[in-house]
Image (cartoon, coloured by chain):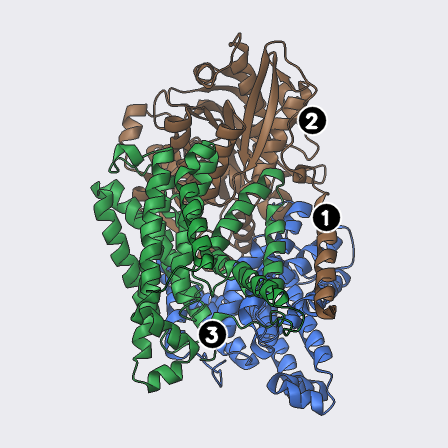
Amino acid sequence: MRGLSTGRLTALAAGLAAVAGLVLLPFLTDSFYTFVATRMLLLGLFATAYNAVFGFGGMASLGHAAFYGIGGYSVGIGVTRWDWPPLVVLPVAIVLGAAAAAVFGIMCLRVRGIYLLLLTLALAQAIAGLAFYQTEWTGGDNGIPSISRDGLPSAVREGDGFYWLSLGVVAVCVALLWMYQRSPLGMSVVGVRESEARMSATGYRTGRLRIIAFTVSGAFAAVAGVMEVYLQGSVSTANMHWQISAEVLVFAILGGARHFLGPFLGAVMVTGLEVWVSTYTDRWMTVLGIVYIATALFLADGVLGRAGWAVRRAKDLRAGPAAAPAAAPKDRTELPAEAPA
Amino acid sequence: MLTWLTHSVNGLAYGSLLFLVASGLTITFGLMRTVNLAHGAFYLIGGYLAYDLATDGTDYWLALLAGVVAAAIGGMIVERAFLHRLAGRELPQIVLTLGVAYIIGDQILANYGGDPVAPPTPPGLEGPVTIGDWIFPKFRLVMIGVAIGLALVVGALLKYTPTGAKVRAAVDDEEIARAVGIRVPLVFLLVFGCGTGLAAFAGVWGGAFTSLAPESGFEVLLLALIVVVVGGLGSIGGALTAAFIVGLVDQYGKVWFPEWALFTLYASVAALLAVRPSGLFGKAVFR
Amino acid sequence: MQFDMAKVRAAAAAGAVLLLVAACGGKDPSAKGAPDGDSKATGSKGSVTVGLLNPATGPFAALGTDVNAGFEAYLKSKGGVLSGYAIKVAKADEGTDAAQGTTKARQLVEQDKAQIVIGLVNSAIAYAVAPYMEDTAKVPLLITVAGADGLTRKQNGNTFRLSYTSSQDSMPLGPYTCKDMGKQKAVVLGLDYSFGWEAAGGFARTYEDAGCQVVQEIYAPLGTQDWGPYVNQVKKDADVVYVVAPGQDGVRLLKAYRDFGVKLPIVAHGATVDETILATEGSSADGVISSLHYTPQIDSPQNKALLDAADKGGNQYLEDGWAAGMTLEAALATIDSDPTPDKIRAALAGVKIEAPRGPLSFDAYGQAVYPVYIRKVEEKDGKRVNSILTSVPNVSQFGTYDPATYLGFPGYEKLKGSWSK
């Protein structure tokens, strides 16, 4: 056991304050912001799940909308056809999302870098094509409307209650992902990211690790998709649009893909920005574009990466002028997915 | 019999359109290894500008030229201001060019509205040709010839001219190229401008074929990406072949099993990439 | 500390882009975001907040802009006051997916305190927003474009719709094509998605019930770039082709149809040749006969008022927005004070107005009943227009069928492909 240093105590206090703030949020703000916060939580979970493949697995997928959408359609089809309760929907969605992701992982065994990106995009587009045309099941472009939340306990069915439900689900999932990431399994996936050749030479079956990373990621992405559809009460092909895949990639980069909570932060920031800017101007896509450009140019290691650098620099300065000046954040900071294959 | 001839030639014509769009991308993406998701946005710039000028009474070919030049300059600005700082880093390139595409698309929406527009069909190419009982649109036939011609010209330029040699050298080994006196940044700048200029040319011609709306940029981009990747990055001949194959697959897919149209196209591309990541004619695996 | 020149340059470049964006952003009057209507106006009876929820981005942005413009033009013509109530407008972007649509609907209701929400173009989003408005917000929703048949199938709900259900406007065209035009065998050529099946179904059902036969059905995916493969499959021995393809698909379809020299005459859903795309379609639209609840060619004082107020010439979306203004005015006229959402809902159900399109009222399901025009594309003063051939009064979402019988029919997505058998 390590002792608690002051730094750790501060972190603990900040963490507790954050938790209290999240739990009490519905009392602190109005119903609309509670709704927006619910969406932020769910997208944050989606981004955190995505990062299991992207930041920690070193594989830049552009197909995660597929798993998110599969989660969504599991709710839509299960509830409207067979009146499945959430406790049936959720496991089914997790299994389907994980299975689809495993297929993605297997298909991607031989590809790296940009090829992996395009292959996942093509796979996700193929699935979106199915969602669009298998109208018997998916309702085509109108999607499946009027998905009831009746299976949920009445206390968490609406508004604030649903926010707390989402908070609980997201907290559990993020905690599970954290445990996975810190486990020997999760660590060896990071090892594959750092040097696949070395891991392979030391006896790890790197292909299997890559598939596992996809599977875990797909399962939790599906959970986010499930909750989102319960929130909206409808699901359509928009839930599988490839721009969702691109958006989650930006969440991860903007927040900081090297940090466990970076993508979550990125999701909160971009979603908040979209809601806020679109209140004032119809040209919010332009503002979003500028944010993307700025992210690519100045925040390649993410907000958390930058913050970490600033903290380190402050420490160095305090250590006195004699200390070597902090290395400026390398403008060419290597992004995880670009680690040598 | 004639129906099948029509289907096949039309598949080739559609493939030619895809090649026109993809040709610029084979240069910027295939050759320079710069991922440009704003390629479709430059397609829009060319198409909308030519439409704007041509409907105001400017000569068609002048309007076409203006669209191409504007997009080439725009592309060079993006390369010089942003992209060259991200050389070799695909992910920031993706995010950056996606941002550029959002801005350009949104500004086109703000200035032209979202109703579809179409640049005119090139003069003299309107209407069908009739050979015996066989009827086929003149514009589409010419498009096949233009695609093949363009592939030959671009291929020859790269292969046989000193400029082409410089480009290939700069792409293959930037440091050695610099050491032997090639101004690599300038080469990249010009090559990128050519790529976006070609996108704009495709926008003017493709716009006459399919009409334009602010969303067309992304629709076109996905298909062009497929063609470039299936053909193998950097291979002009490969891109042309892939474009013809995709055009024919798309055509016959629509005739035989229309309800699976999107699925069959993307699933077969995915299957190909899973087995042959470097595409049909690609050489080394990229990175 | 030393300046990093590369970074300074990049920042300067980013700044330049920002300036550029700011410079070209202002051209479109609707680009300046959410104005608060005519803030100077005061009403004798108080004020009402209207939420306008239409797309400002994405593929339907043009339609949304037109609906907003129509509504605001009507409001302006009344000095910002409808039936004694000053109208405060809160505008939001419907966006391209349900997540954004519902977020903005909530913002309008919960933050801007809208007492009625007007708009919605995308049916998938409308399906997500309508239950929220009905069950949670309890604020009436007046739909101005979204066409899915299923949106107005509940009696005494708080969803109303001024625009067509996808099948509504095509139903009068069936008997017209069969009997008046005498075309016995039709090919259906349309888009393979809900709107396409419902619009084609409305035509096919009435056409076959009039005694004629659909001999072939061809459906192409939404966003089909090349219609060549589809127009080439049209059976040459048919008498007429029924076409449904709004927006860009319509432009591409008609161009391919003419380019490949297909000779059969075209009848169409009105959205295939409406004024938003007619100029782009050009000569390829000549002679197309279509059915729709509006054409700028309608000769009435109400329509003239609309055309005078709208500077870009009329189209169905402008009229939908304009008619939404008239509908709200008529509803508010029956409310003496304190216009709660509930009172507005009750008042909407009884609205009867003389809109630019003609007499308009709502059925028990909240769907508008109005005349439908059979129109033909012709050149007039160097411009292509939809001239009126004839009109059919009081067309409801059930056509000439009994509502109970009609609601018993299987959905059009199941009937697709079965008309030609």
Q: Which mark is residue C22?
A: 1
Residue A283: x and y in percent read 63, 45
Q: Which mark is residue C309?
A: 2
Quadrant housing the N terminus of chain C: bottom right
Callout 2: residue from which chain?
A: C
Amino acid type of the residue that numbered disc 1 sits on in the rendered structure: Ala
> Which residue is painted at 63% across and 23% down in the image?
C74
Circle nearer the viewer, 2 or 3: 3
Chain letter for brown, please.
Answer: C
Q: CA distance from mark 2 to mark 3?
A: 56 Å
> Which residue is painted at 52% across and 53% down in the image?
C257
Q: Residue furthest bottom?
A: B180
Q: CA distance from mark 1 to mark 2?
A: 29 Å
On screen, residue A189 versus residue B5, left or right, reads left
**In this view, B149 is above or below C334:** below
Between C311 and A302, which is closer to the camera in this rendering? A302
Between B172 and C349, which is closer to the camera in this rendering? B172
For disc 3, the neighbor class at 10 Å (few under 14, some 14 to 19, many from 20) is many
Residue A192's quadrant in the figure?
bottom left
Q: Which mark is residue A113?
A: 3
